[in-house]
Amino acid sequence: MALATIAAWRPVADRLFSGESVVLAAWLLGIAGYCASHLVRGAMSGMGKFGAYSRQLGGEAVARFIICVALALAGAAHVGPYALAVGAAPFLGLLVSLPGQRGLITDGPPAPWAEISASLGALLAGSILSMAVANLGPLFIRLLASPSEEAEAGRFLAALLVARIPLFLFQAVQSALLPKLASLVSEGRTSEFRRGFRLLIWFLSAAALVGIAGAFTVGSDVVRIMFGRDFALGSRTAGMLAIGAGGFMIASAIAQANIALGAQARQAWAWAAGVLTFLIVVGLERNGLYWRVELASAASSLAALAAQAVVLAGRLRGDASIDGANLFEAITDLSLEP
């Protein structure tokens, strides 16, 4: 991706970043930083080192905030320095979380390379497709906007950030979910696994409904307070984006269960169904820029959710050896290593 971007530097900068080469450079810096960050996060969560995991997330966020505040106080008005701050933040998060860590890389049980490569390929495809479901909206706002609508991408992204507040909070659960599910699957008690996971889905559904209701009622006001009057959009936009965010959150939780149950390829296809739904809806709908993308974003997340649920139901119904323990109890009993 980085090499392809460098090869097409000017067209990419002009079409997606309004000609800002510094922003494109910051984007490439961020790709490298988040690649390293997610690799380390996976190792930390898998080893139960959630103290270090939280320091990485917190260090990245604090570093980004401090640098941007310093730039604002210094009078920086150009977008370039702020973009570089965002791109560099993942490396700063690594600096505050990696020192003193031991045992992040340990030998596991032997496995054939063919099995590993197939699983990694499916996981990579699922990761890319899930991020497409989450982020096609802002991209298509930028691509479909007319010259007079160039500022709409920023306004749309502001509303999207507010709509995704419950999704950001879900990250804390997600980091513990997959490794614990993977260990529980090998231990036993199918009925308790189902009961515990059902409780988790009810909890996430309630959180999503609260977020959706809040977005439809006060979403526009929150966007205006956080980003200013120039970024204010109607509550319908915030509400539709909240539907998409809620659906994506629940779909992500089910995808974690599918991965733990060995359905890596099927969960990737479920995300592909979400991407296909977005493209179909945004292609067929013609009633306004925002509505096209809002509707496509909500529909794609709900389609991915439904597809992931079908995969999970089939996996649980079709494999009698799948077992697990109460998910909520397992998460609350995690040994959080500093």
Image: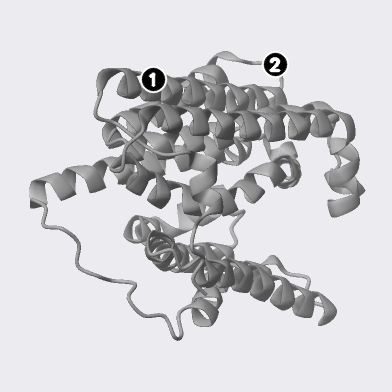
Kindly identify the amino acid type of the residue bearing the numbered disc 1.
Ala
Q: Residue at x 64, y 22 (%)?
A: 295
Across and down, in percent, residue 280 comes to 49, 18
Q: Which residue is mark 1?
A: 313
Q: Residue at x 40, y 67 (%)?
A: 40
Q: Is residue 304 above or below residue 9?
A: above
State the scheme by which the image is colored: one colour
Residue 163 appears left or right of 227: left
| Label 2 CA crowd tier, 10 Å (few <14, some 14–19, many 20+) | few
Observer able to see residue 81: no
Q: Nearer the viewer, residue 112 or 120?
A: 112
User: Which of the 4 image quadrants contains residue 245?
Assistant: top right
Distance of label 1 from label 2 (alpha carbons): 36 Å
Decide which of tag 1 and tag 2 comes sooner along the chain: 2
Q: Residue at x 40, y 44 (%)?
A: 181
Q: Is residue 227 above or below residue 319?
A: below
| Label 1 CA crowd tier, 10 Å (few <14, some 14–19, many 20+) | few
Q: Nearer the viewer, residue 162 or 49?
A: 49
Residue 279 appears left or right of 4: right
Kindly identify the amino acid type of the residue bearing the numbered disc 2.
Asn
User: Which of the 4 image quadrants contains residue 307?
Assistant: top left
Q: Which residue is mark 2?
A: 287
Element assignment for label 1: helix
Q: Residue at x 55, y 74 (%)?
A: 93
